Image: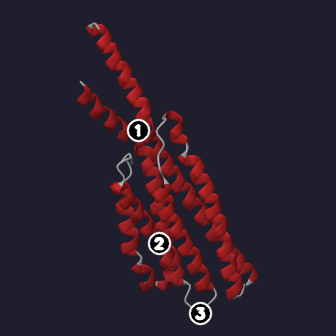
């Protein structure tokens, strides 16, 4: 094989390698999109429930059932959307990513949110404890995603520290809800909703830079 053919083969392998790893870029964007959808649906559900409660003056039992039904629908929609969005990167690669651990973490957090909504809104436990648990469980979900990404050798490693930072912020600021119950939902909205939205936007905006950084690093190693 001539030097020219060898150089051509290296370039061809380089192109194949880039295509194979382009899914890492798409995964980062997909994760950001999923969390933006999650937070948007959460805000819509909570706002709708509050308006219904104020308009109909519901009892504790009906309020609990309303929250349970709304969040059950929420998790069903999110599961379907997340499954379809997560499949997008597979278009560019034969390699299949395993998202079961991540889905399991958020499924457990979701079930705990549903159970807590039923218990709290069907008893005389103050409503602020649901707000508190909602923020804590979101934080636990992000921390779980961080440890899963950290210990998964097949994970692209493009979304890891971001999970840790947001998870710690959510948990560490959650006591503010109990300290200032009058501003419970304002605190949760500011920390959970806006924080998660910024998280999703950040992942989408930095996806190309992360991929370029990976490409430059691997390009220098191959030369």
For the residues labelled 2 and 3, the Cα–Cα distance comes to 21 Å
Examine the image and state in which quarter residue 213 appears: top left
Q: In this rendering, is residue 85 above or below 43? A: above
Q: Which mark is residue 29?
A: none
Mark 1 = which residue? Answer: 208
Residue that appears at 50% across and 34% down: 92
Nearer to the camera, 90 or 202: 90
Q: What residue appears at the point 36 percent right and 41 percent down from the top-left corner?
A: 210
* Badge 1 or badge 3: first in the primary sequence: 3
- Residue drawn at x 28%, y 6% is 2
Occupied quadrant, residue 162: bottom left
**Badge 1: how crowded within 10 Å, few (<14), some, or many (20+)?**
some
Q: Nearer the viewer, mark 2 or mark 3?
A: 2
Q: Earlier in the sequence, mark 2 or mark 3?
A: 3
The first of marks 1 and 2 along the sequence is 2
The residue that disc 3 covers is 124
* Residue 112, horizontal then vertical, whole percent: 53, 75
- Mark 1 vs mark 2, foreground winner is 2
Above or below, 19 against 38 in this view is above
C-alpha span from label 1 to label 2: 30 Å
Nearest the eye: 184 or 223: 223
Q: Residues within 10 Å of mark 3 (few under 14, many from 20)?
A: few
Residue at x 34%, y 16% (from the top left corner)? 9
The residue carrying pointer 2 sits among few (fewer than 14), some (14 to 19) or many (20 or more) residues within 10 Å by Cα, namely: many
Instruction: Give percent across and percent down for residue 54.
Output: 70, 80
The CA span between labels 1 and 3 is 50 Å
Q: Which residue is mark 2?
A: 137
Is label 3 in a helix, a strand or a loop?
A: loop
Residue 154: give x, y in percent of width and height.
38, 47
Does residue 50 appear in this view?
no
């Amino acid at each position: 094989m001539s030097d020219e053919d060898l150089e051509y083969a290296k370039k061809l392998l380089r192109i194949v390698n880039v295509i194979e790893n382009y899914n890492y870029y798409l995964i980062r964007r997909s994760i950001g999109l999923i969390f933006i959808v999650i937070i948007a649906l959460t805000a819509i559900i909570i706002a709708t429930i509050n308006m219904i409660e104020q308009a109909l003056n519901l009892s504790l039992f009906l309020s609990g059932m309303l929250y349970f039904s709304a969040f059950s629908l929420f998790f069903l929609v999110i599961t379907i959307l997340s499954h379809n969005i997560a499949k997008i990167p597979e278009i560019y690669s034969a390699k299949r990513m395993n998202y079961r651990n991540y889905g399991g973490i958020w499924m457990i957090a979701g079930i705990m949110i549903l159970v807590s909504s039923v218990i709290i809104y069907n008893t005389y436990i103050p409503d602020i404890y649901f707000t508190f648990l909602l923020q804590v469980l979101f934080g636990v979900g992000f921390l779980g995603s961080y440890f899963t990404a950290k210990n998964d050798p097949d994970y692209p490693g493009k979304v890891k520290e971001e999970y840790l930072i947001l998870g710690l912020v959510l948990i560490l600021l959650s006591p503010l809800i109990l300290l200032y119950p009058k501003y419970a939902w304002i605190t949760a909205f500011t920390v959970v909703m806006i924080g998660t939205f910024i998280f999703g936007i950040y992942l989408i905006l930095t996806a190309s830079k992360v991929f370029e950084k990976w490409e430059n690093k691997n390009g220098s190693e191959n030369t």
